[in-house]
């Protein structure tokens, strides 16, 4: 067999031609950069771990869901830069089972990746999401501040069926916004909760926030835990989005707009909070646990 120019193919040319055909039949996998960040933490193994995948264009939603399931973290954030807007990105969040409309710790992680790893030089970044624009600014002490919508809770009466069975305890007050807010008298009661996740997953809410006053001696205004088995997260270590509801509730109860919060999950984490009319500021630190690449066909 001769080449188009009439010359016989050499062995090397035949090998190259075969390799080209194989590449066309079996293209190499795409490479996605991947970062595992512990949010609301100052050292690894604390705070809330999140995956972050910076992209140039959106992947199919099914593939992003598969990546989040494979990561098996509470949330994985995917970000895409906006054309002509160097300080703006689109963001989407996936739990191992579903896409969600707002996630604080994964947004913090995404901003941290831009600042710490991708040479982002602006003082703040805007993420455009299903919940509207979300601003994240970098503070002089290294903290990152999320600017999130406030979601004040409304009193629920009667209490949702199954809530007491789900918490295996009876809160003194029950309210709700996106999530149920179950208020207890003491931190010890919240710490002692051993939920029945099947009952909690049956509630018609994203998750259940359990909260109580914090330790005045430690300067903590309120504590919380967050359970969301309905979206594949039995207990979230530190939940930024839950504070969109916690901050307006405790700001009104305590008569102050600046608060210190602590999520008392086994990993735990501290948050600095501020209420600004219909917005809340949620601040915390973040650290990198690992970096790598994801290979997908």
Image: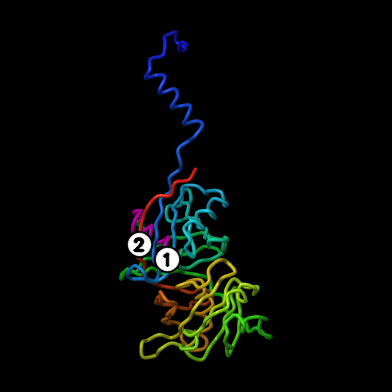
SS class of the residue under badge 1?
strand
Residue located at (34% from left, 56% from top): 117
**Magenta stretch?**
107-120
15, 103: nearer the viewer: 15
Question: Disc 1 designates what residue?
Answer: 49
Compared across the picture, whether 268 is left or right of 172 comes to left
142, 9: nearer the viewer: 9
Neighbour tally class for label 2: few under 14, some 14-19, many 20 plus, Cα within 10 Å: some
Neighbour tally class for label 1: few under 14, some 14-19, many 20 plus, Cα within 10 Å: many
SS class of the residue under badge 2?
strand
- The numbered dot on residue 105 is none
Vertical order, 278 against 106 (above or below): below
- The numbered dot on residue 289 is 2
163, 270: nearer the viewer: 163
Locate residue 37, reporting x and y percent. Answer: 39, 62
Vertical order, 282 against 136 (above or below): below
Residue located at (33% from left, 59% from top): 116
First in sequence, mark 2 or 1: give its number.
1
Residue located at (65% from left, 73% from top): 204
Q: Does the residue at mark 2 contact the one at mark 1 (Cβ under 8 Å)?
A: yes
Compared across the picture, whether 179 is left or right of 35 comes to right
Locate residue 135, reporting x and y percent. Answer: 46, 64
Q: Main secondary structure of the magenta part?
A: helix
Q: CA distance from mark 2 to mark 1?
A: 9 Å
Locate residue 152, reporting x and y percent. Answer: 57, 78
> Outermost residue, left direction?
141
- Asked if residue 57 is among those painted magenta in the image, a careful observer would answer no
- Asked if residue 112 is among those painted magenta in the image, a careful observer would answer yes
> Outermost residue, top direction?
6
Vertical order, 140 against 157 (above or below): above
The number of callouts visible is 2
């Amino acid at each position: 067999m001769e080449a188009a120019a009439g010359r016989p193919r050499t062995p090397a040319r035949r090998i190259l031609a075969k390799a080209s055909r194989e590449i066309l039949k079996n293209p190499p996998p795409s490479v996605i950069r991947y970062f595992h960040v512990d949010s609301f933490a100052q050292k690894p193994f604390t705070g809330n771990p999140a995956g972050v995948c910076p992209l140039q264009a959106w992947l199919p939603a099914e593939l992003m869901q598969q990546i989040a399931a494979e990561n098996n973290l509470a949330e994985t954030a995917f970000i895409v830069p906006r054309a002509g807007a160097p300080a703006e990105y689109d963001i989407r969040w996936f739990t191992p089972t579903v896409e969600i409309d707002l996630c604080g710790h994964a947004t913090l992680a995404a901003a941290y990746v831009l600042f710490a790893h991708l040479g982002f030089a602006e003082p703040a970044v805007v993420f455009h999401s299903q919940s509207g624009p979300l601003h994240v600014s970098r503070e002089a002490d290294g903290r990152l501040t999320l600017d999130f919508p406030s979601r004040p809770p409304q009193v629920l009466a009667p209490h949702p069926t199954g809530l007491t069975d789900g918490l295996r305890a009876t809160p003194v007050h029950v309210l709700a916004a996106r999530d149920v807010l179950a208020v207890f008298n003491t931190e010890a009661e919240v710490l002692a909760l051993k939920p029945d996740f099947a009952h909690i997953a049956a509630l018609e809410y994203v998750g259940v926030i359990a909260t109580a006053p914090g330790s005045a001696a430690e300067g903590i205004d309120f504590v919380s835990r967050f359970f969301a088995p309905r979206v594949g997260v039995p207990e979230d270590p530190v939940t930024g989005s839950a504070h969109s509801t916690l901050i307006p509730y405790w700001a009104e109860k305590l008569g102050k707009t600046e608060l210190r919060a602590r999520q008392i999950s086994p990993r735990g984490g501290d948050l600095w909070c501020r209420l600004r009319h219909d917005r809340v500021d949620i601040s915390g630190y973040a650290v990198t646990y690992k970096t790598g690449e994801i290979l997908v066909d």
